[in-house]
Image (cartoon, rainbow, N blue to C red):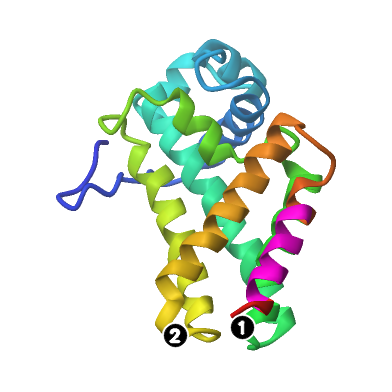
Amino acid sequence: MGADAAGTPRRIVMTPASRRVLEAAGRLFYAHGIHAVGVDRIAAEAGVTKKTLYDRYGSKEQLVVEYLADRDERWRDFLGRRLEAVGEEPAARVLAVFDASHAWALERGGKGCGMVNAHAELSGPDHLAHPVVTGQKAWMLDLFTTLAAGLAPERREELGRALLLLHEGGLVAHGMGVFPEPLLCAREQARALLASV
C-alpha cells in the first residue's frame, strides 16, 4: 500500500466485499470517530471476516485513506453538480459552494466536516491519510481563489483565503452545534464580503 513518490496515497481496487467494508467503515468512522472503531466492528458490520478486511485493505490506516478519499470524491461530485446548475457567474458560484455545504451537512453531516474530524485524530503528517485531508482543503482553497479571480483578480489570494476561512468555520461550527445554521450565516458573510469587492 503506502504512497507514491509524490506522497499521494495509493488506492486499492474495489471488489464487492471491499466496497461493503468501505461503506461500513464510512458510517462508523464518521459517527463514532476513527480511533473508537476497530476493524472487528467494521468487519462485522460489513458481513466479512477480519481476514477479508485485511486481505482487501492491508491495514486500518489504508482503510482510513479509502474512507476519506471516497468522501472527498463524493463531495466533489456533489459540489460539481451544484456549480453546474448555477452557471458561470463567479459570485453565484461562490454562494453555491456554501449552499452545497449546507445541503450536504443536512443530508450527510451532522457531525461536521469528516476531513476536519479525521485530521484531529490522525497521528500527524506521517499518517497515510494526511495528504488526503490536506489535499482536500488545498483543493477548496484553489476553488475559492479561482472563483475570486473572476471578481477581483488583484485580490484573488486574499479573497480566496477569506472565503475558505468562512466556509471552514461554518463547517466546524455546524459540527459542534455552536449556534443554529452556521453555514447559512457563513454564506451571508461571504455575500457581504463579495458585495464589498
Rendered location of residue 111, percent (x, y): 70, 32
Residue in the picture at 52% in, 16% down: 49
Q: Tell me which label, 2 or 1, sits earlier in the chain.
A: 1
Residue span colored magenta:
185-194
Name the kind of residue labelled 2 in the image: Pro
Rendered location of residue 100, percent (x, y): 72, 61
In the image shown, does 81 or 116 lie closer to the viewer? 116
Q: In the figure, residue 88 lies in which quadrant? A: bottom right
42 within the magenta span: no
Figure quadrant of the C terminus: bottom right
**Is 31 situated above or below 41?**
below
**Label ID, residue 153:** 2
In the image shown, does 91 or 14 lie closer to the viewer? 91
**Label ID, residue 105:** none
Identify the residue position indicated by label 1 in the image: 90
Rendered location of residue 68, percent (x, y): 49, 41
Q: In the figure, residue 188 lies in which quadrant? A: bottom right
Residue 80 is left or right of residue 187, and the answer is left
Q: Secondary structure at mark 1?
A: helix
Rendered location of residue 133, percent (x, y): 43, 43
Residue in the picture at 71% in, 70% down: 191
**Is 167 situated above or below 148?**
above
Residue 114 is left or right of residue 103, and the answer is left
